Image (cartoon, rainbow, N blue to C red):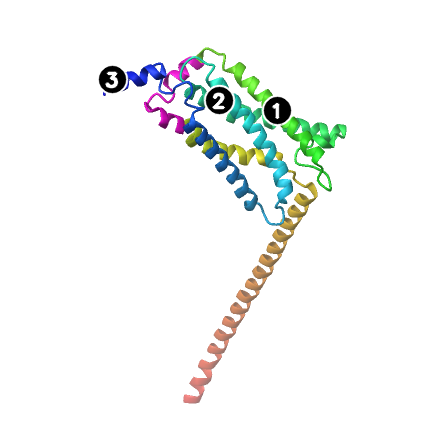
Amino acid sequence: MNSTTTETNSDTGGLHCSKDALTNMFGWFLQVLLASLAFTCLIAKRFCEPRGERRSWLIWFYDTSKQGMGAMAIHLANVWLAGQYKGDPCTWYLINFLLDSSLGLLIIFIGIRLSQYLARTKGWDNINFGEYGKPPSANAWMTQCCLYVCLMIIVKVSITLFMQLDFWDNVKAFILSPIPNQNVEVAFVMLIIPFFINMLMFWVTDNFLMYKDPAKRRRLSSSSDGLLRKLHVKYRSLARKRRRDSESDVLLSADDELLDSETVPIARTVHA
């Protein structure tokens, strides 16, 4: 037992995760599995869209392929950078990934909104994310893909500069420290944690990227307003009917009391 532990520590340099743990056969298997699961989530998202607003498969591919290329570029950069830092590469990969999914998502949102603003004000239709013309133009899609990858490069450069701060050494000292097994640690940083975060991130980013027709939103808003008005009119008509029924019940009860009061003296007269 001791000799095995010593041999493992010498192979990994005293680290839980060796330098090539992210790029060995097990690591690549987890990466392919994660990519497949993330792609499946985007397919499920399309079927969750309302039937009247559901994108065609071509538009869906144009929207999601940008995410796929950007995510692949970021992932490969994180795998390479994790081996360049001093210390456990799994912890460095996880820190990079969490920053990409939080601070990086904010940068992506700002970049997409800025490009859409420039498209409206400058007339640069090809950089208006989610809009490809009618019929859909492959040139617009390619332009948006290149622009999105540039946004991901900006994200990665910003995160890398942010990672130069000294306090990250203290963070990586305790992150994942309770997990002594290398394969379990790789599974956590390459599959388990990224799956849930990627599912949320891909869902949110796809909402940023997909085109939302203003006319359709106005029609949906007007139809919802019309439905509310119909419900309000129906409620008022039911309320009026209820009031009329209650008034009729009061009149009928008054008539019954009057008839009862007249019937009693007549009955007494007959007996007399």
> For numbered disc 3, what is the local secondary structure?
helix
Q: Quadrant of the N terminus?
A: top left
- Report the side of 8 relative to 208 (left or right): left
**Point 53% across, 21% down: residue:** 77
Q: Report the Cα–Cα distance between label 2 and label 3.
A: 31 Å
Indicate whether residue 98 is drawn in magenta. no
Dominant secondary structure, magenta:
helix
Q: How many other residues sit within 10 Å of disc 1, few (<14), some (14-19) or many (≥20)?
A: many
Which amino acid, mark 3?
Ser
Q: Report the Cα–Cα distance between label 3 and label 1.
A: 49 Å
| Tag 3 residue | 3
Are the two marked residues, 3 and 1, in contact with CB atoms closer than 8 angstroms?
A: no
Looking at the picture, how far across and down is residue 4, in whole percent?
Answer: 27, 20
> For numbered disc 2, what is the local secondary structure?
helix
Label drawn at residue 79: 2
| Tag 1 residue | 151
Which one is in front, 50 or 260?
A: 50
Compared with 183, 40 (above or below) is below
